[in-house]
Amino acid sequence: MGASYAAKLQDAPDTDVRVIATGARAEGLRREGVTVNGKRHDFTIVAPDDTVEPADLLIVAVKHMALPEALPQVSRHISDHTVIVSLLNGITSEAQIAEAYPQSHPLLSITFGIDAVRHGHEVSYSSLGKMAFGEAVNEPPYSEQAQWLARLFDAAGLAYEIPTDMVRQLWWKFLVNTGVNQITGVLEAPYRIVQDPASPARDVMIAAQREVVAVARAQGVDLDESDIDSWLDVLDGLGPTQYTSMAQDTLAHRRCETDIFGGMVHRLGEEAGIPTPVNASLWGLLKAKELL
């Protein structure tokens, strides 16, 4: 996902995209670049301790497990004026970034409708989807940071929206990923396994998402059944042979992010006295897969 956005931004006028990387990853990026939908992109590669001008925009696009390691690496690349956007899954990364850099002001953000798949240094997608971003509550005129990012996305041809209630949008994406990522991760299957209305996997996905609705409402977030319906509308437009990020991880025998999905739902459910058997089961199965 990070490569897909970086490629679009690099193609925009008057933009300079740089990637913070070290070691073998930095060497590989310099040598091979990144190919996105068949086009090679060579980004400027910088080390965490390089002396550079602070970035206007920092996109954090690592896996959730890597965030504690990544946060110290960006300290020399941001200032009080840097707009920070997290592409991480879950509902906690913006708070973690703000805790590490109290002077910063990360926008809340989600992406949806993107079906990017990575193979080494090659990324492909049939749908780039859209990003929603902004403050917790957004009313025109929007914050300076949100307006600036909107202008940049307009120049890059990136679709976006600025919802009134961004916290609700964050939880909506959490609902989406908790269902579709975990079931496709367990089955190591592409989107088509949950696109068929008659598929038992689709039923499990929706059951997991209904548990998120219950937990969200206990947290004061008014998700409901219509949010699952709106996800199903998005799901219909995704490439049936494409894979979620979690399915890509389990296929490659990598650690996956189930702790921030099923694990988080199960923990919040226990705190609120809400049963979450589907997410507890998916979480357990995915943790067991990591031992194989």
Image (cartoon, rainbow, N blue to C red):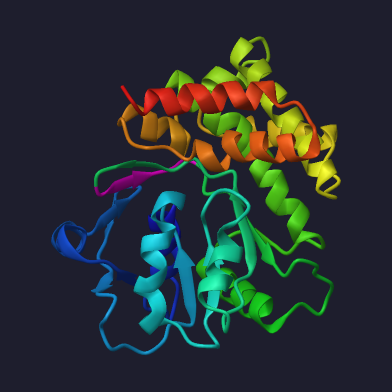
Q: Position of residue 246 (x, y in %)?
A: 45, 35
Residue 275: x and y, percent?
75, 26
Q: Is residue 251 above or below residue 15?
A: above
Residue nearest the viewer, comparing 170 with 195: 170
Q: Of 68 and 125, which appears nearest the observer?
A: 68
Q: Nearer the viewer, residue 231 or 25?
A: 25
Q: Which residue is found at the position 22% from the left and 66% from the top?
A: 22
**Residue 148 in the image, given as x and y percentages of width and height:** 62, 80
State the residue at coordinates (85%, 37%): 224
Residue name at image x 56 percent, y 71 percent: 99
- Whether residue 7 is visible to the viewer of this picture, yes or no, is no
Residue 150 position by quadrant: bottom right
Q: What is the magenta range?
A: 121-126
Q: Is residue 142 above or below residue 4?
A: below
Horizontal arrangement in the rendering, residue 228 relative to residue 82 (left or right): right
The image quadrant of residue 210 is top right
| 261 left or right of 175 in image | left
**Point 15% across, 58% down: residue:** 24
Query: Vertical placement of 43 versus 180: above or below?
Result: below
Total numbered labels placed on residues in the image: 0
Residue 104 screen position, x and y as percent:
57, 80
Task: Please check the rendered image and state whether residue 225 is part of the magenta-colored stretch, yes or no.
Answer: no
Q: Quadrant of the C terminus?
A: top left
Could one spot residue 50 in this view of the protein?
yes
Residue 34 shown left or right of residue 218 in the figure:
left
Residue 123 lies in magenta, yes or no? Answer: yes
Q: Nearer the viewer, residue 90 or 285?
A: 285
Establish if 85 lies above or below 207: below
